[in-house]
Image (cartoon, grey):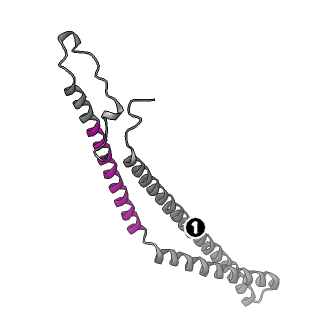
Amino acid sequence: MGKFDNIKISNFDELFSKTKTVAESLNKKGVQAFDMSRKRLDYLDAKAKLSKLYEKYGKIQFEAFAGNEIDENELDMLTAQIITYREKLAELKAQLEEVNDNTDLKREAEDLKREVIIASQEAKEVIKKQVENARNAINNKVSQSSRPSSADAFNAVEVEAEDVVSDEE
């Protein structure tokens, strides 16, 4: 066991708790952004497929207009596919609009940035306080001991854990 095992670390526990909260928030935002990107890709993919279906449908209709024989089953199949993709596009568009309405990603990114800055400032203050407490304990121990003789000038100063106590006790 080290000499500083009994130092109060409640501030560090709080720091780790805040760090965990920020990490969980980042993870949640990342998942949301990934889902949004996936839906955008699905939307663009469905839009491209619908465009190709319209092109095929148009070619068949033109052949019918020109008086050429066409496959009615293929036309019916294309019609069903077009209807399906139009419904899918409408659903994806509604989902994307809902996500856009419910989340302003830029605002959330700024909020998260502020959270990280505040957490890092708090961590810095906790560490500075712990270092100051340790420095004060060492200075107290040194001032309590007698002045070393020239032969003892390089002896190490031992600091007990109970000497390093935070001001909160």
- Reading the image, the residue beneath label 1 is 41
Q: Which is more toward the observer, 10 or 52?
A: 10
Q: Which of the image's four quarters has the N terminus?
A: top left
At a point 55% along the width and 69% down the height, the residue shown is 40
Q: Secondary structure at mark 1?
A: helix
53 vs 161, left or right, is: right
Q: Which residues are magenta?
A: 105-133
Q: Estimate the x, y position of residue 22 in percent, counting from the top left.
A: 44, 57
What type is the residue that disc 1 sits on?
Leu
Q: Which is more toward the observer, 67 or 160?
A: 160
Q: Estimate the x, y position of residue 49 in percent, counting from the top left.
A: 65, 73
Residue at the extreme top of the image, as rendered: 151
Magenta-colored segment: predominant secondary structure: helix
46 vs 6, left or right, is: right
Q: Estimate the x, y position of residue 35 in percent, counting from the top left.
A: 56, 66
Q: Estimate the x, y position of residue 147 in percent, counting from the top left.
A: 17, 19
134 vs 16, left or right, is: left
Quadrant position of residue 57: bottom right
Asked if the stretch drawn in magenta spans residue 78, the answer is no
At a point 34% along the width and 34% down the height, the residue shown is 162
Say above or below: 142 vs 48: above
Q: Which is more toward the observer, 61 or 115?
A: 115
Quadrant position of residue 52: bottom right
At a point 53% along the width and 75% down the height, the residue shown is 96
